[in-house]
Amino acid sequence: MTDILIVGVGGQGTLLASRVLGNLALSLGYDVKLSEVHGMAQRGGSVVTHIRFGDTVLSPVIDKGGADIILAFEKLEALRWSGYLKKGGKMFVSTQEILPMPVITGAEEYPRDIAERIKAAAPDVVFVDALSLARKAGDIRTLNTVLIGALARRTDIEKKAFIEAVKATVPKRAIETNIAAFELGYNL
Amino acid sequence: MRELMLGNAAFARGAYEAGVTVATAYPGTPSTEITENIAKYDCVYAEWSPNEKVALEVALGASVAGARALCCMKHVGLNVAADPLFTAAYTGINGGLVIIVADDPGMHSSQNEQDSRLYALSAHLPMLEPADSAEAKEFVLRAYELSEQYDTPVIVRTNTRLSHSQGLVETAPRRDIALKPYVKDIQKYVMMPGMARKRRIVLEKRMREMETAADAIDINRINMKGAGIGVITSGVVYNYVREALPEASVLKLGLIHPLPEKLIKKFARRVDKLYVAEELEPFIERKIKEMGVPVTGKQIFPPWGEYSVNMIAEKIGGVKRDEYDFGALPQRPPVMCAGCPHRAVFYTIKKLGLTAAGDIGCYTLGALPPHTGIDTCVCMGASIGMAMGMEKARGEDFTRKLVAVIGDSTFFHSGLTGLTDMVYNGSRCTVIIVDNATTGMTGHQNHPATGKNLKGDIAYAIDIERLARALGVKHVRTVDPFDLKALENTLKEETARDELSVVIARRPCALLDKKTKLPQFVITDACKQCGVCLKLGCPAIKKTPRGITIDKAVCTGCALCENVCAFGAIETAEN
């Protein structure tokens, strides 16, 4: 069983990333369940998608302390969800900072020690400047594929299977940019 | 073919395969995608109805006329549809009628956490509850069979986890279901006292028959492991139980009303310790206790929120997983998008110090800081009724600073009757209709004023101004919320007026209006860091150690910040 949690801010493209991983698991012949967030929370709120694959998947959601991998699209969200990582699990964190409204209005402060706190929870963490790499690939919206590339390098699953899953999931006109983004993440 | 399918897509697929030809709904998270998916099939007539009551009446009419019909809603939508629901149980059906209702344990996107199973109980209607996408499809097919076999509407219950998770589904071709003949039958379909009394007995007899059948139906099944722990469960929680307690015996209920008494007693006899794992109300637990069977449920489980594998493992299995505590973090509540036309309305409401009875939609976010521009949010349409009540309780002076705020789609759903009350019983209130030309929060669905229907075809667009005037509102004004000055003046004038007025703040949803490319804004050296622009609560404007900045990736050029800046320090990027 492999449990992957994708976390970020509503509107960042976490859903598409989860669908790429869902298609990947399908292509490998596994049972798959994905759990998504729709509705109110999508409006710039904290969002999470659960991906579980293996011989038989029962619960569609991952519990605290259960994720093998966390893919985080935003630093504060990475920390918020780090409690979901299994002991010895891997984290891939985009270094992008998106200020939540209580920080914008000055009611709260954006923590400055996020990286250290994540490392304490997840020693096996890779920080990725996914936004810059996505820009380099030609479209900042491909930051999700950059992170998938970074993840692909550190799994036992064949690179080719990842690329096929990306191709099968993203819109046709965006395939080229997304493959470029994937390679940039992969070759970090 | 095996496909990865969203629970809601699987429900739609089930209805398609069952030969449904009429499907109705009002959007509501987490149920919306069922209807969006079934609308993709050309052979199915599908509509966004103005509200759930109308949706169920249309579906019931289709059923009486001989078609297999589907009606979908979220849990609170069932309150709106409750009136036809209770009597549809009496009339029964002609073509199969299935109602899918989506509960929201944990209130991801809802104002309350009510348990729809209690509707099945009090309306005397059978209810099924699937556990994953594959069952979502299968149970809808079964529901149509049961509906026609027992001459009753059947409710299928889902929840956020099931509706919004994807799992593998085996698809099959659509069944060829012929339209049943329509036969006039006033004893069955005209529910006046003389006929209804007879149907009441039919209803009771039907439920007794189903109760007996429930003991043998294959969607209620026992999976015996050890004789120690036995758990009775249903729906998504079944998955948590299986995963947390692989050695426990499980009675999985697919039909959750009526409950199978003999089967439950048989299962209870075969295990040492019996538990019920069910989210929300102790619905199954109460029934088991009525049977005289000792069982543990809400004694150890909370009656609110979602359950999880960890919770089951801890409460029944006695195994607690270590949880890592990283201390307090800034919350990230949902916010109005950059360029959202609602922002200007709440900025102005706050500036004028108005009391605002609010409603259900994206604009409910106006209640949060920095706007805090809404005082109440209860249910669809409540803004108008509650404003009327506030006026009648506190009098004219109070009402000079009082508005009701309601969205365009919500106005059609439940605002018309409230406004009628204001006209009829003499209100001097101001009703603001924030018209963003869509049903925003649920993901942009059409409604009676958008000029398009669910299928995307051209439809008659009801004119909200003319509608309000036709009801008898003398003062109806439309204003562009991006014209901040006009908005403020209009609200000042209309709240001061001693007569009822409607102000329509009209501007399409920022997410919908992708075509209008307005020039973006930047903050110049003239900025005094006063922070007034930050009070707009715009996700594009940020305070950084280097001063206040506007994020180019987020700014839509709505110009609201330019309008509120007293120092002329916000300009279009082109200057």
Image (cartoon, coloured by chain):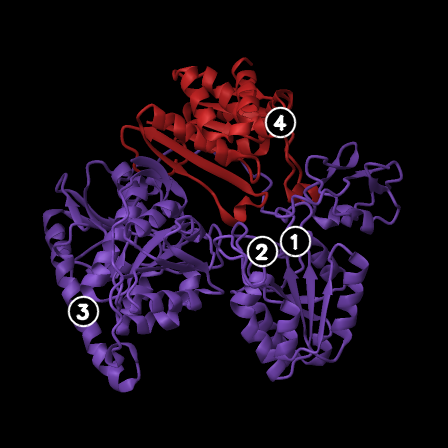
Chain colours: A red, B purple
Name the residue carrying label 2: B438
Q: Secondary structure at mark 4?
A: loop
State which quarter of the image contains the N terminus of chain A: top left
Question: Local crowd at mark 2 within 10 Å, few (<14), some, or many (≥20)?
Answer: many
Cβ atoms under marks 1 and 3 closer than 8 Å: no
- Locate residue B363 relative to residue B61 in the image: left or right: right
Q: Chain of mark 1?
A: B
Figure check: B51 above or below B571 = below
Q: Residue at x 60, y 75 (%)?
A: B419
Q: Position of residue A157 (x, y in %)?
A: 39, 17
Where is mark 1, residue-wise? Answer: B508
Is residue B172 positioned above or below A144 on the image?
A: below
Spatial CA distance of label 1 from label 3 is: 50 Å
Q: Residue at x 40, y 19 (%)?
A: A161
Separation (CA) of disc 4 from disc 3: 61 Å
Classify residue B244 as left or right of residue A35.
left
Disc marking residue A103: none
- Residue carrying label 4: A139
Nearer the observer, A66 or B79: B79
Crowd rating for badge 1 (residues with CA inside 10 Å; few <14, some 14–19, many 20+)? some
Figure quadrant of the C terminus of chain A: top right
Q: Are marks 4 and 1 on the same chain?
A: no
Tell me what residue is drawn at x 83 percent, y 42 percent: B570
Q: The residue tagged with tag 1: helix, strand or loop?
A: loop
Per the image, the residue denoted by label 3 is B206
Answer whether residue B122 is visible to the viewer in this image. no
Circles 1, 2 touching at the beta carbon (< 8 Å): yes
Query: Could you say where residue B76 lies in the image, as x and y percent from the top left?
Result: 44, 62
Q: CA distance from mark 4 to mark 1?
A: 27 Å
